[in-house]
Image (cartoon, rainbow, N blue to C red):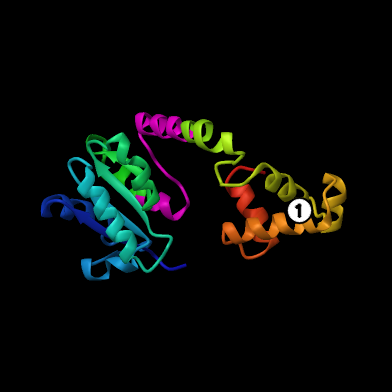
């Protein structure tokens, strides 16, 4: 397995050098120079306070990235609530407060990204959960959608697909025509850019609908 490719971006050279020193010389990390930042698996972003400019920088980095899987670890004193969802959309997965950002914590957060982990301060996590609940309550639920953008009928079909049923069996179980079930599956796969039925079931599991 190749080392985790990490690029450091900081507001000042001293902070950048300190963050890079935590990662330098490790066999499991390849520290990339700025010119190779688009190749990074992880962007370690260090700033005194995250603001609109910081989130715009995340967006630009995500746009320049050669990998849709690039993730961002932010070390900052604060992350304004109104910017949180935008930052997550750009790939933010972990937030460390500067006062808590010991070398061990920073290294753990960066390596955790490679293992699919995330780290958020309690206050940030609480605000995120509340915003997700608000979206579910006020936007998705009234329109019959789940957090993954699935309709109630699509979830029903996915659950039966996951049980190994074919189109005819699903139509019989749900008292729909076979054509209706095919249309439900086709519409869902087209809207969500899903490759096949197995991919659709996997998507349903990941978004918590199944």
Q: Can residue 108 be seen in this view?
A: no
* Residue 163 pos. (x, y %): 79, 50
Q: In which quarter of the image is residue 29?
A: bottom left
Q: In this view, does 72 lie above or below 82?
A: below
Write the residue at 34% across / 68% down: 39
Q: Is residue 109 above or below residue 37?
A: above
Magenta-drawn stretch contains 117: yes
Magenta-drawn stretch contains 19: no
Image position of 87 (left or right of 34): right
Write the residue at 51% across / 36% down: 139
Disc tally is 1
Q: In this view, does 67 lie above or below 156?
A: below
* Residue 57 pos. (x, y %): 24, 54
Image position of 80 (left or right of 11): right
Start-end of magenta stretch: 110-132
Label 1 crowding class (10 Å Cα cut-off): few <14, some 14-19, many 20+? some
Write the residue at 32% across / 49% down: 73
The residue at which mark 1 appears reads as: 161
Predominant SS along the magenta part: helix
In front of the other: 93 or 53: 53
Q: Quadrant of residue 202?
A: bottom right
Image position of 51 (left or right of 96): left
Regarding mark 1 in the picture, which secondary structure is present there?
helix
In front of the other: 91 or 171: 171
Image position of 105 (left or right of 163): left
* Residue 140 pos. (x, y %): 54, 38
Q: Is residue 14 visible?
A: yes
Rendered-image quadrant of the C terminus:
top right
């Amino acid at each position: 397995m190749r080392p985790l490719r990490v690029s450091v971006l900081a507001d000042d050279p001293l902070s950048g050098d300190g963050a890079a020193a935590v990662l330098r010389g490790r066999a499991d990390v390849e520290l990339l120079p700025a010119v190779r930042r688009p190749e990074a698996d992880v962007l370690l972003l260090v700033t005194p306070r995250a603001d609109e400019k910081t989130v715009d920088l995340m967006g630009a980095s995500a746009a320049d990235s050669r990998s849709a899987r690039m993730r961002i670890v932010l070390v900052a004193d604060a992350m304004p609530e109104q910017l949180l969802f935008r930052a997550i959309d750009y790939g933010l997965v972990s937030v460390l407060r500067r006062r808590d950002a010991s070398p061990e914590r920073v290294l753990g957060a960066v390596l955790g990204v490679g293992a699919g982990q995330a780290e958020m301060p309690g206050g940030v996590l609480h605000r995120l959960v509340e915003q997700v609940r608000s979206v579910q309550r006020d936007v998705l639920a009234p329109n019959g959608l789940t957090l993954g953008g699935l309709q109630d009928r699509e979830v029903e079909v996915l659950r039966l697909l996951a049980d190994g049923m074919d189109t005819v069996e699903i139509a019989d179980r749900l008292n729909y025509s076979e054509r209706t079930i095919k249309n439900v599956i086709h519409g869902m796969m087209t809207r969500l850019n899903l490759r096949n039925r197995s991919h659709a079931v996997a998507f349903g599991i990941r978004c918590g609908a199944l």
